[in-house]
C-alpha cells in the first residue's frame, strides 16, 4: 500500500478489506472488535479514525457500515498523477511527486 501502518493498524485494515471482499459490505465496529479479539469498540473506533486520518480508509460520517478501503496502487491513480504532471509547473510537479511518495505511488514509467 505504501502508507506505513502499525501492526494493529495493519490487522484492522486487512480485516476490513477481507470482510468487504467476503460480505460485500464493510464490517461494523462490533464485527471488527469480535473478529480481532479487541477489548472494546472504542479501541476499534480509534484505530479506524487513525486509518481514515492517514488515508488508508474512507468513511461517510453518520452512516453505518460505510468504511471503504483506499488502494493507491490502482493504475487509474497513477494515470491521474501523470496526467496532472504533464501540464503542471515545476513547482506543482514537485508537489505532486512529494504527494505520490507520501501515499506510496510509483510514478516511474512502465517499460
Image (spheres, rainbow, N blue to C red):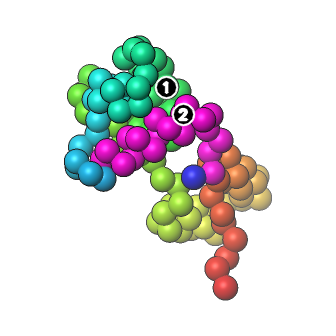
Give the position of the C terminus as an image quadrant: bottom right
Q: Residue furthest front?
A: 37
Above or below, 102 relative to 110: above
Q: Position of residue 91 (x, y in %)?
A: 76, 52
Q: Which type of secondary structure does the marked residue at label 2 adopt?
A: helix
Residue 86, x across and y down, in percent: 64, 69
Circles 2 and 1: CB distance less than 8 Å? yes
Left/right placement of residue 75 relative to residue 101 reads: left
| Residue for point 66% across, 63% down | 106
Dot 2, crowdedness within 10 Å: few (<14), some or many (≥20)? some
Q: Residue at x 36, y 48 (%)?
A: 18
Q: Is residue 48 left or right of residue 101?
A: left
Rendered image quadrant of residue 105? bottom right
Mark 1: secondary structure: helix
Q: Nearer the viewer, residue 54 or 24?
A: 24
Whether residue 7 appears in magenta in the rendering, the answer is yes
Q: Residue at x 45, y 28 (%)?
A: 48
Find residue 27 and report its horizontal and vertical position in percent: 29, 35
Residue 111 lies within the magenta run: no
- Percent of width and height locating residue 22: 26, 51
Residue annotated with mark 1: 47
Residue projecting furthest to the bottom: 111
Which residues are the magenta region?
2-20
Report the Cα–Cα distance between label 2 and label 1: 6 Å
Q: Earlier in the sequence, mark 2 or mark 1?
A: 2
Name the chief secondary structure element in magenta: helix
Residue 9's mark? Answer: 2
Going 54% across and 39% down the picture, which residue do you hit?
A: 10
Asked if one can make out residue 54 in the rendered structure from this viewpoint, the answer is: no
Figure check: 18 above or below 82: above
Instruction: Indicate left or right for 59 with 101 as reference.
Output: left
State left or right for residue 1 relative to residue 42.
Answer: right
Amino acid at each position: 500500500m505504501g502508507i506505513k501502518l502499525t501492526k494493529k493498524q495493519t490487522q484492522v485494515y486487512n480485516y476490513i478489506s477481507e470482510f468487504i471482499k467476503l460480505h460485500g459490505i464493510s464490517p461494523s465496529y462490533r464485527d471488527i472488535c469480535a473478529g480481532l479479539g479487541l477489548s472494546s469498540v472504542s479501541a476499534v473506533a480509534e484505530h479506524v479514525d487513525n486509518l481514515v486520518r492517514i488515508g488508508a480508509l474512507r468513511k461517510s460520517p453518520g452512516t453505518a457500515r460505510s468504511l471503504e478501503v483506499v488502494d493507491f496502487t490502482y493504475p487509474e491513480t497513477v494515470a491521474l498523477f501523470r496526467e496532472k504532471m504533464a501540464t503542471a509547473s515545476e513547482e506543482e510537479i514537485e508537489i505532486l511527486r512529494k504527494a505520490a511518495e507520501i501515499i506510496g505511488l510509483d510514478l516511474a514509467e512502465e517499460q
